[in-house]
Image (tube, rainbow, N blue to C red):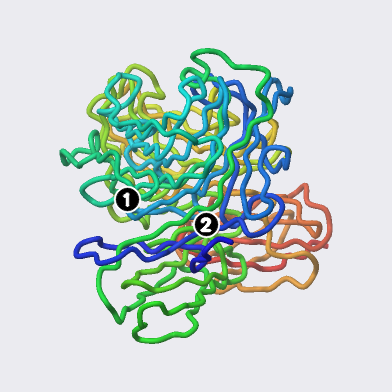
Amino acid sequence: MKNMLIIFAIVLKVNLSFSQEWVPVWNEEFDYSGLPDETKWSYETGCANRNNESQYYASKRLENTKVENGFLTITTRKETLNGCNYTSGNIHTRYKANWLYGKIDVRAKLPKGKGMWPAIWMMSTDESYGTWPKSGEIDIMESVGFDPNKIFMTIHTEAYNHVIGTEKGSNKLLTDVYDTYHIYSIEWFPDRVDFLIDGTKYYTFPKSGNTTAVWPFDKPFYLILNVAVGGDWGGAQGIDPLIFPQQMSVDYVRVSKWQTNPGPYTVTTSSTSGGTFSLNPDLNTYPKGSIISLKATPQPGFVFSGWEGDISGNINPINFTVYDNAIIKAIFKTECELLQNGDFASSMSKWNMYTGDGAIAQTTVNNGQCNIVISNGGTNIWSTQLSQSNIPLLTGKSYKLSFDAYSEQSRTIKAGVGKNSDPFNTYSYNTVNLITTKKNFALQFDMNNTSDQLSKILFNLGSNASDVYLSNISLCDLSKITYINNEVEIFNEGMSISYENEKVHLTLPDLDRYEVNIYDFNGNTKFSNSLTGLKSTLDIKNFKSGLYVVKANNLRGKVLTQKLIIN
């Protein structure tokens, strides 16, 4: 039997100075049966996602990822699926459990044979410094089948990575990685990352400079467990077709942090507009080891988006154990909103700034506006790109991308939504003409491609060195509404509506920009537009007689609804 640790679903980030002992903050014991726990794990899917690998990573398929008898098993199979000749599994904790510093322990047994490439590794959650390798990669354990029993421990950054032959790391030759479980670990501090196997340290990567090119490891990372088949490294000596199926078996994943003071501790809480949350028990201070229940409650027209501050993930309600002072913020967004931090209230959180092809650009946030200062735009329009990923788009639905923008000098940019992996095709891609004064842009599109749960919104700003300023970015699912039948909750503070001669006369409570939608009784969107100013006239001459709902919301969280009856 495993020694059960305290089970949480979130992580507290801490100052690691003057630490005294490791204390558990998250773990996965795989003490259930079926698919991996979706409150902790997500799937990467697709064929040959990176490194010219040969497998298809399948989602929610017991043949490839299965929990049974206290173990997670990731199985590689020689079978054709979606154009690939092999299948396997890849699960990760991104946006569900993310850590800044701490100890990661994974007890695992590895697959065997030429072509196998198992990995236990970590990537930057928000890619704050750019796409790979700029935001870093920590390979806790890698092994390739043609080099039996050898374990590789590696760091990748912009300055140190395998593409330019400068990666940093070490390796250790063991004797029994295929038949015996070993504990693969890192101990991650503000000044170094230590790599361990079975508690023995074999390599240390020290912080040798203050630039992100050599040390991007001051942002939260998430954990990945996968087995690749073939690829540039794993398949360097071919794939043995006779070895399949092969399995990586994982006994547990345990995450700890250094305790920094003996307590008692404070928990400081806040939330964005659109909801409230409660602590139980709600005390001024908490003794070490106190278990707190935290629940977020959205207001009508809003949904809970996730936690920020010293909690990661979006599980609600949730329990956690207090081991240090904590700051917790609950994030709410309007129910149609697909983006996070579109108002830049949390600085650049969730946003990624990419530069390539010689481009040089820096971002700052002031008063809810993202300022992209471009010294060199690079050779292509995509050489300078602001993006946010992990956005679900569903076939047949309608969406609306809106934002405020202007530039240092008149110029064009490209804005849209597209695939976040090769071949990076776009679902909506528009030329936007910017001038030197702020202007609102609204781009509506239908998703005519296959559903993509991991798409990204993108602003391509390259091939031009004029600075760009963006704010109030929103991507709205136009099918999302707050009512099902006649019992619509009316909250029309300061909003009034009148209907005359096939026109709706709308008065809004202030001069903010509002997203205004009109829905029919069945929930279909009949009108959608961004409006500013106190009074507007809407032409609805094609509307049939019946009951409608007018909904107006601004980016500060105000949501107004009112019935409209057309005779």
In the foreground, 483 or 408? 483
Reading the image, the residue beneath label 1 is 187
- State the image coordinates of residue 384 (x, y, percent, origin top left): 35, 28
**Residue 116, above or below 216:** above
Q: Is residue 131 visible?
A: yes
Disc 2 secondary structure class: strand
What amino acid type should be assigned to the residue bearing mark 2? Answer: Tyr
Position of residue 167 in the picture relative to residue 512 (left or right): left
* Residue that protrudes farthest toward the top in the picture: 237
Disc 1 secondary structure class: strand
Numbered mark located on residue 514 in the image = 2
Question: In percent of the image, x 35 and y 50: which residue is there?
Answer: 199
First along the sequence among labels 1 and 2: 1
Q: Is residue 539 visible?
A: no
Q: How would you rate the neighbour count of disc 2 (Cα within 10 Å): few for under 14, some for 14-19, many for 20 or more?
A: many
What amino acid type should be assigned to the residue bearing mark 1? Answer: Glu
In the foreground, 523 or 350? 350
In the foreground, 323 or 557? 323
Q: How would you rate the neighbour count of disc 1 (Cα within 10 Å): few for under 14, some for 14-19, many for 20 or more?
A: many
Q: How many marks?
A: 2
Question: In percent of the image, x 30 and y 63: which residue is there?
Answer: 258
**Residue 66, above or below 430:** below
The quadrant in which residue 537 appears is: bottom right
Q: Are marks 1 and 2 in contact (CB under 8 Å)?
A: no
**Residue 257, above or below 107:** below
- State the image coordinates of residue 105 (x, y, percent, origin top left): 43, 51
Q: CA distance from mark 1 to mark 2?
A: 48 Å
In the foreground, 214 or 437? 214
* Residue that protrudes farthest toward the front in the picture: 175
* Residue that protrudes farthest toward the left in the picture: 209
- State the image coordinates of residue 308 (x, y, percent, origin top left): 41, 61
Q: Quadrant of the C terminus?
A: bottom right
